[in-house]
Image: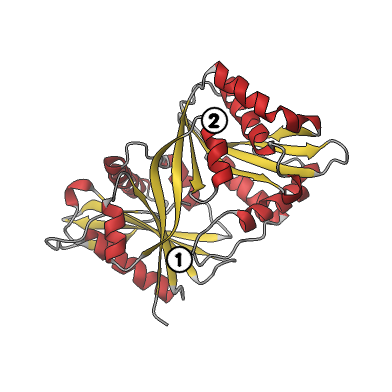
Amino acid sequence: MAWGWVAGMSKALAHVEIVEVDPKDDAALREFHEVEQSAIVEDRPDQLSRSFDALANSVRHPNPYRSSTLLTALVDGAVVGTAQLDLELQDNQHLAGSEINVAPVFRRRGIGRALHDEVTTRRRAAGRPSIIGEVYVVGDSSAGFEFATALGYRSAHVEAHLVLDLPPSVEALDALAARAEPALASYEIVTWGDRSPDEYAEAYCAMKTQMADDVPTGELDHEPIVVDLDRLRTTEERTARSYHQLIAAARRTSDGTMSGYSQMFLPHGEGHVIQDDTLVMPDHRGHRLGTALKLANLRAVLDEHPERQRVHTWTALGNEAMLRTNADFGFRQAELMHEMQLEDPR
């Protein structure tokens, strides 16, 4: 789940009514989505946002690992702002996550602050003394960054949002294949879709747990999670409602050891792809496996999903190895994502 703010500090306070959205109310949910998207698109030319179906599927099917509450801000009965409050249910139970958006023409009227006040009341009632959210910066600053900073949030982690336009040139693909070739002398690439084969599931869980340990998180007050089989299967089932998955995994040919994986999400009915995790297990690094894995998934997208026009990914600014790999693929930086955190005084 991505969290973020697109709002402004108030110039003239509007009379704002905050209402919780019933996920089963299709009209209310569509109003929420329309306002959310209008705010995101206004500020971010290369934005990536969820479809209505992805939103509906996420909130209409209970998640045993996270609860989500949707709020709308109404002025004279019209929806002008939205907020989402997420609470982890099994891990990081000191944390809340939030996303706040205000329709562009209604900014700087106190609407964002009113939504934030409601989010604060609810997360404190749930016993969550810390809250995090994402803001995106194009250029030097953004309304979201200024809003969060004015409320006392600090930037605890920064990632580059990178974009690759499809299709890449044949020459670029050939160059990537040449870089990845040494890895294929000792490893084979196995692939699957929405559900991990039973024979690989245990090793896949171990790799995803390793990914949670390894992924840079800066100064975020967030503990890595352990991925077990129940969590894996639950996540796969929920994800399949809105996304098709592509998984490429490396298997050492000498002993069958699973050595790394790369994961892509293809939203149903959309034109983009999300490049998510890429991990090489510690004992198998230095062989260009990361390039081989990402290339296998990219070729699958080009061959099986030619309608896709862009790939989006995020990489921590300090992760120089992955930044170099992404540069090899032709990714360009679109914006910076700041994970902002606020902790209540103790």
Q: Where residue 342 sits: x, y (%)? A: 39, 68
In the displayed structure image, the side of residue 253 where residue 306 appears, left or right: left
Image coloring type: secondary structure
Instruction: Tell me where residue 133 sits by quadrant.
Output: bottom left
Q: Give the Cα distance between marks 1 and 2.
A: 35 Å
Identify which residue is drawn at 76% across, 49% down.
Answer: 283
Name the residue type under label 2.
Phe
Mark 1 or mark 2: whose residue is earlier in sequence = 1
In the displayed structure image, the side of residue 307 where residue 137 appears, left or right: left
Identify which residue is drawn at 42% across, 42% down.
Answer: 50
Residues at discs 1 and 2 in contact (Cβ within 8 Å): no
Position of the C terminus, as image quadrant, is bottom left
Q: Report the disc number at residue 96.
A: 1
Q: Is residue 6 visible?
A: no
Which of 310/216 is in front? 216
In the displayed structure image, the side of residue 71 where residue 222 appears, left or right: right
Q: In this view, does 224 lie above or below 185?
A: below
Instruction: Tell me where residue 296 sits by quadrant.
Output: top right
Secondary structure of the residue carrying tag 2 is helix
Name the residue type under label 1.
Ala
Q: Residue furthest left?
A: 12
Q: Report the disc number at residue 125.
A: none
Residue that numbered label 2 is attached to: 329
Q: Which residue lies furthest to the right in this view?
A: 255
Instruction: Tell me where residue 284 sits by quadrant.
Output: top right
Q: Is residue 274 visible?
A: yes
Q: Is residue 328 above or below residue 343?
A: above
Q: Where residue 139 sits: x, y (%)? A: 30, 44
Identify which residue is drawn at 37% across, 50% down.
Answer: 25
In the displayed structure image, the side of residue 122 where residue 218 appears, left or right: right
Which of 314/26 is in front? 314
